[in-house]
Image (cartoon, rainbow, N blue to C red):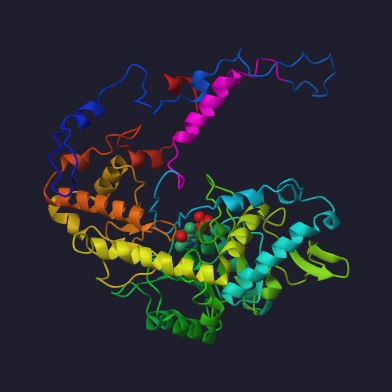
């Protein structure tokens, strides 16, 4: 039980029984208007349905003895029950539409409604990938225009539009690099990909998946990669480096040009993880830094929504060296307009195809709507404001929370570690869980791995100063409470979430992904 002492930093009445009350079990399982919701298998009944269909006319099936004999057993709900079920589930999502979402590395920025309206125009939303290309010229024009913007913003020669996520883009870019290496007859020799310690886990995973062997590059004390460390690892067996810029510590890789030169001198390629492009778009063109391939997460930088696992969109810009190896399909203009090059006969060096069709049309529309509504100057300002917001948070917390690489300017995200928590006995996880009770989605925790007990905060440019101020005040209040030794506020947090502290290790190691009657109790 918790008696929360008054917070001297905050003028609000103390409610000593808050936490005690949070432990009360209600009859319904609801907590006020936070409604409990069972799985559809638990609340549905096989005999109920929301639609009223006539019995089918007698027919002869052609299933050759494989037809189902028992009832299928799908749970049914009445129409209003079905609606409530899904609305309640949707309300369990914390979303960017509900509040500030400071998840570092993810760029959870506002998704303008204008983009949504454009994506729903029938000429974009109601077309089919297999309909004749003469009937979708407008959609192809949009893809071409978006491609032009991406190439202009990055200073690159070509762009593969079809990858459907950042990680998918990494795979695409690395496959283009592999094809280029094989075209030079070095496929058997160049097997190593260098990846800094601070990289997102998808980087080594993508390289490994494609058959490369990953060798890590340590960060130096200031959190960036040292060109000398890269040079030491380069050799005739190295295919590429995968470097993130700004890196996952929120720092600009200041040796990036020297690294690119060294990589090219060694006959290798430079893959840049462009997930953090939101910090530099309109300011720096990756092509000018010597990048050969870079994915762009439209669902981060260009404000398209992060769906529950999809659809994302991860176009890959390519340098002149890699452009010939871009996958099909891609757009080409001829006398009759735009057409998608679908076959390797028309693109003999293309490494192949990585998706069934041309990519995520809805995301393309949203991203271009964002670009056109901002203009080039507006995109530049979005980067500047994202960096300003991150530094405002960083500077406002620097007296209370420790920064692994010292008190210096960051790019679009502010990184703290847990050194300041050590004397309190609390962990990064405790601190993050207490933030849930305050109505915020926690920051990214324990990533990047190079910072002990990392807390990575990315506010983005779309938060107002008022909203940043409330977030900062909340973090300061929690930090003071931790320092005062009010551990009860943390160790069992969250108190107010629909579910309390979960066994996350067990959930990861032993996920229950399938409902079974026995487990339902
Ligand atoms: C988000 C992210 C990725 C992966 O992008 P997905 O679209 O989630 O596949 C890769 N690298 C970094 C640094 C990221 O932040």
- Residue lying at the far right in this picture: please name it: 335
Between residues 120 and 232, which one lies in front from this camera angle?
120
Q: How many marks?
A: 0
Q: Position of residue 512 (x, y in %)?
A: 45, 33
In this picture, residue 405 sits left or right of residue 153:
left
Is 399 or 343 nearer to us in this picture?
399
Check the image and report above or below for 18 versus 166: above
Above or below for 295 versus 225: above
Camera-side residue: 332 or 293?
Answer: 332
Q: Is residue 56 left or right of residue 292?
A: right
Q: Residue at x 36, y 22 (%)?
A: 29
Q: Position of residue 478 (x, y in %)?
A: 21, 49
Q: Is residue 495 magenta?
A: no
Q: Position of residue 234 (x, y in %)?
A: 47, 81
Q: Residue at x 78, y 70 (%)?
A: 347
For residue 102, side relative to residue 67 (left or right): left
* Stretch in magenta: 68-97
- Examine the rendered structure and indicate whether residue 386 appears above or below residue 252: above
Quadrant location of the N terminus? top left
Residue at 19% over, 63% down: 399
Q: Position of residue 374 (x, y in %)?
A: 56, 64
Is residue 69 on the magenta stretch? yes
Q: Quadrant of residue 138?
A: bottom right
Image quarter in which the C terminus is found: top left
Asked which quadrant contains residue 253, the reply is: bottom left
Q: Say if 334 sits above or below 455 in the image.
A: below
Residue 169 in sight here: yes
The residue lying at 76 percent from left, 48 percent from top is 127
Q: In the picture provided, is 54 more to the left or to the right than 515? A: right
State whether residue 215 appears in this view: no
């Amino acid at each position: 039980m918790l008696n929360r002492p008054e917070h001297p930093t905050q003028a609000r009445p103390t409610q000593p029984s808050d936490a005690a009350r949070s432990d009360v079990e209600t009859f319904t399982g609801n907590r006020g208007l936070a409604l409990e919701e069972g799985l559809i298998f638990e609340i549905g009944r096989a005999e109920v349905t929301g639609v009223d269909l006539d019995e089918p006319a007698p027919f002869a099936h052609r299933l050759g003895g494989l037809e189902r004999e028992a009832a299928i057993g799908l749970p049914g709900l009445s129409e209003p029950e079905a609606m409530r079920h899904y609305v309640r589930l949707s309300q369990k999502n914390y979303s960017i539409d509900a509040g500030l979402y400071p998840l570092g590395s993810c760029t959870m920025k506002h998704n303008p409604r204008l983009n949504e309206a454009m994506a729903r125009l029938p000429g974009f939303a109601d077309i089919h990938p297999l309909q004749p290309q003469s009937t979708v010229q407008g959609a192809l024009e949009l893809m071409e225009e978006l491609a032009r913007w991406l190439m202009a913003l990055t200073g690159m020669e070509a762009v593969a539009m079809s990858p459907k996520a950042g990680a998918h883009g990494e795979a695409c870019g690395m496959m283009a690099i592999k094809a280029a290496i094989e075209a030079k007859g070095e496929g058997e020799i160049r097997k190593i990909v260098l990846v800094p310690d601070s990289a997102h886990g998808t980087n080594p995973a993508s390289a490994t998946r494609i058959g490369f062997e990953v060798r890590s590059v340590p960060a130096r004390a200031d959190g960036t990669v040292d060109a000398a460390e890269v040079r030491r690892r380069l050799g005739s067996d190295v295919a590429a480096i995968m470097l993130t810029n700004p890196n996952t510590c929120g720092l600009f890789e200041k040796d990036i040009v020297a690294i690119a030169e060294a990589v090219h001198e060694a006959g290798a390629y430079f893959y840049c993880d462009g997930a953090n492009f939101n910090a530099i778009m309109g300011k720096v063109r990756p092509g000018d830094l010597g990048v050969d391939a870079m994915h762009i997460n439209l669902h981060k930088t260009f404000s398209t929504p992060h769906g529950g696992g999809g659809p994302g969109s991860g176009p890959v810009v390519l340098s002149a060296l890699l452009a010939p190896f871009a996958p099909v399909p891609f757009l080409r203009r001829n006398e009759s307009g735009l057409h998608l090059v679908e076959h390797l006969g028309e693109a003999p060096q293309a490494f192949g195809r990585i998706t069934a069709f041309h990519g995520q049309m809805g995301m393309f529309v949203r991203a271009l709507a964002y670009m056109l509504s901002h203009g080039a100057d507006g995109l530049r300002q979005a980067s500047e404001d994202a960096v300003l917001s991150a530094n405002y948070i960083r500077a406002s917390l620097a007296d209370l929370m420790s920064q692994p690489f010292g008190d210096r300017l960051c790019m679009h995200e502010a990184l703290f570690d847990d050194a300041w928590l050590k004397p309190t006995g609390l962990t990064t996880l405790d601190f993050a869980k207490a933030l849930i009770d305050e109505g915020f989605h926690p920051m990214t925790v324990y990533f990047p791995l190079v910072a002990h007990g990392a807390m990575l905060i990315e506010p983005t440019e779309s938060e107002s100063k008022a909203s940043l101020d409330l977030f900062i005040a909340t973090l300061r209040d929690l930090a003071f409470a931790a320092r005062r030794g009010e551990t009860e506020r943390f160790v069992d947090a969250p108190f107010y979430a629909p579910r309390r502290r979960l066994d996350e290790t067990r959930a990861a190691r032993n996920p229950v992904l399938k409902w079974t009657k026995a487990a339902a109790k």
